[in-house]
Image (cartoon, rainbow, N blue to C red):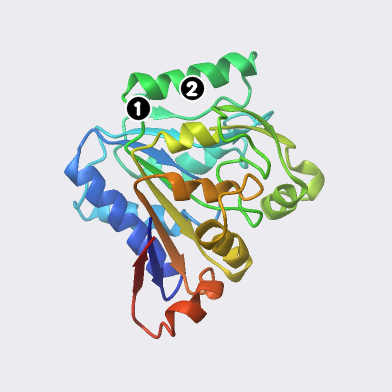
Amino acid sequence: MEVIILKDYDSISKKGAEIVIEAVNAKSDLVLGLATGSTPLGMYKEIIDSFNAGEVDLSNVTTFNLDEYCGLFPEHPQSYNYYMHTNLFKHVNIDPDKINLPNGMAKDFNEECRSYDEKIRRVGGIDLQVLGIGVNGHIGFNEPGTDYGSETQIVKLAKETIEANSRFFENVGDVPTTAISMGLKSIMRSKRILLLASGNNKASAIFNTIKGPVDPQVPASILQLHPDVIIVLDREAADLLMEEHGDLDDKEIRFSL
């Protein structure tokens, strides 16, 4: 596990984009796992800017998103399908046939979950999986207590997750309470993982992920067991790590575990 601590949100967005673009340029048919939420938005903007500058070609990339709310049509403004098309896909040259998101309106959710993992297997697995992290340590929508052997499944969202996501809806009652999510086993099959975190509200989850025991109550702590993980943090998200690693100023701090 490599940890990179940078000054601010803009810095981690640029670093995240740099890592993704380097991976695509090294393997044009990269299989890329994508995340939603507020944290990756800056990274997606940086990728769009790099595409417009002719620095990356995404035409052969295949994408798989981590999750999707149950009960929201793809066109719903708060669906992750809508989010991805608005914030990345429609601005770059990704082939629409190579875009994969869970279907939150599936008639048979068990079959949708099974087939989603099968699609990933058929393309040889995810080369680089982008993750965010929840305030309770969730990755994807894998809430505390999720089985480490879980594959893509229907999950019930924790109260903290619903409250955190309510900022995207008119009120908390509008937030779906269930979602389709890649499971922890599905995520851990990825060849390489990039986790981005920003803000002081993520500091405890990050500290427990990196420095705590591997514990199902902190789902992201399972990343300690993965052979190739990069965690990119802004200063606020790394707050509880800073005593050990000193003042950041304008420098970049890197350490490996």
- Indicate which disc residue 98 carries: 1
Question: To which quarter of the image does residue 96 belong?
Answer: top left
Camera-nearest label, 1 or 2: 2
Q: What residue do we see at 56% from left, 64% from top? A: 207
Q: Are marks 1 and 2 in contact (CB under 8 Å)?
A: no
Q: Quadrant of the N terminus?
A: bottom left
Q: In the visual, does 200 lie left or right of 35?
A: right
The residue indicated by pointer 2 is 116
- Of the pair 174 and 61, the residue shown nearer to us: 61
Question: Is residue 140 depicted above or below 253 in this figure?
Answer: above
Mark 1 Cα shell of 10 Å, populated few (<14), some (14-19), many (≥20) = few
> Which amino acid type is shown beneath numbered disc 1?
Lys
- Indicate which disc residue 129 carries: none
Q: Position of residue 110 (x, y in %)?
A: 62, 16
Q: Position of residue 139 (x, y in %)?
A: 56, 46
Q: What residue do we see at 19% from left, 45% from top? A: 25
Q: Quadrant of the C terminus?
A: bottom left
Q: Position of residue 203 (x, y in %)?
A: 58, 67
- The answer to whether residue 49 is seen in the rendering is no
- Of the pair 96 and 1, the residue shown nearer to us: 1
Tag 2 secondary structure: helix
